[in-house]
Amino acid sequence: MIKFAIYGKGGIGKSTLSCNLSASFAKRGLKVMQIGCDPKADSTSLLCPKEKVTPVLDLVRSSKPFTLEDMVKESESGVLCVEAGGPVPGLGCAGRGIINALESLENKGAYDIYKPDVVIYDVLGDVVCGGFTMPMRKGFADKVYIVTSGEKMSVYAAANIAMAVENFKKRDYAKLGGIILNCRGVENELSNVETLAKDFDTDIAAVIPRSPLFAEAEIKGKTIVDLFPESDVSASLLGLAEKILNDYK
């Protein structure tokens, strides 16, 4: 089973990339599970645009018994979608939602029952502490891929995440798989991210070009690899999926 986490600051495009990767793997006939680890519970919105996935934390808060089927929704393309959810705004710890989701999936035997070939954890990376590091821990993701643009704050957040991965190395946690450059068209973008990758002895796993197709696909509730399969952006996303598969060979 291939298990990896996508980290990055809020709004950098983690969920869009995660959904496109899920769709890319599904096109190859692989069974994919995408687990959204963001309090907004919108990680899988491009995979399940018509019916929102019930967040695990909402199920836990209801104090009513719930089943594995209540937690997992299968998209039209066959991707298994899970949303951790978060606390009531202003109350509680967002990281707790991630811990509850991952523990609930394990306790109910999700991985043994569904037997996914690929598990993607889509994780908010502005705060790398507590529950937000849960997907990095042993038994969950094996690798972490960090999404960033060349913008200063995005690079800063990416460096913090890379530092957390480095600090956990001795605990046999997830290893850094590489940096994904999601272009925003800023000055010296590629060189800024190349410097970041060099600082942490890793490489740039993919360069995703800036494109209006992202906005168009989002409006239509589709992934780019499904809606615009012949585009350059789709080629970059499919290439990233291929690279990740090769990283596990």
Image: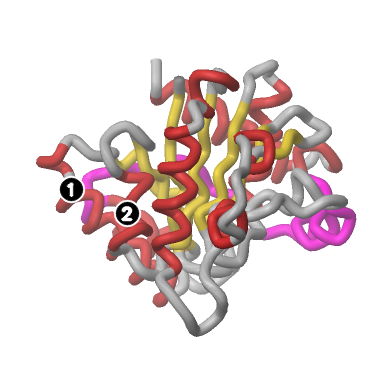
At 61% from the left and 66% from the top, the residue drawn is 40
What amino acid type is highlighted by mark number 1? Phe
Helix, strand or loop at disc 2?
Answer: helix
Q: Position of residue 57 (x, y in %)?
A: 55, 58
Reading the chain from its start, which is encountered first: label 2 or label 1? 2
Residue 243 in view (yes/no): no
Give the residue pinned by disc 1.
168
Magenta segment includes 80? no
At 41% from the left and 42% from the top, the residue drawn is 103
The answer to whether mark 2 and mark 1 are in CB contact below 8 A is yes
Region of the chain picked out in magenta, as a range: 198-223
At 49% from the left and 37% from the top, the residue drawn is 105
What amino acid type is highlighted by mark number 2? Thr
Q: Is residue 31 left or right of residue 50?
A: left
Mark 1 is surrounded, within 10 Å at the Cα level, by few (under 14), some (14 to 19) or many (20 or more) other residues, namely some
At 61% from the left and 52% from the top, the residue drawn is 64
Q: Residue furthest left?
A: 170
Of the two numbered discs 2 and 1 in the rendering, the one whose residue sits closer to the viewer: 2
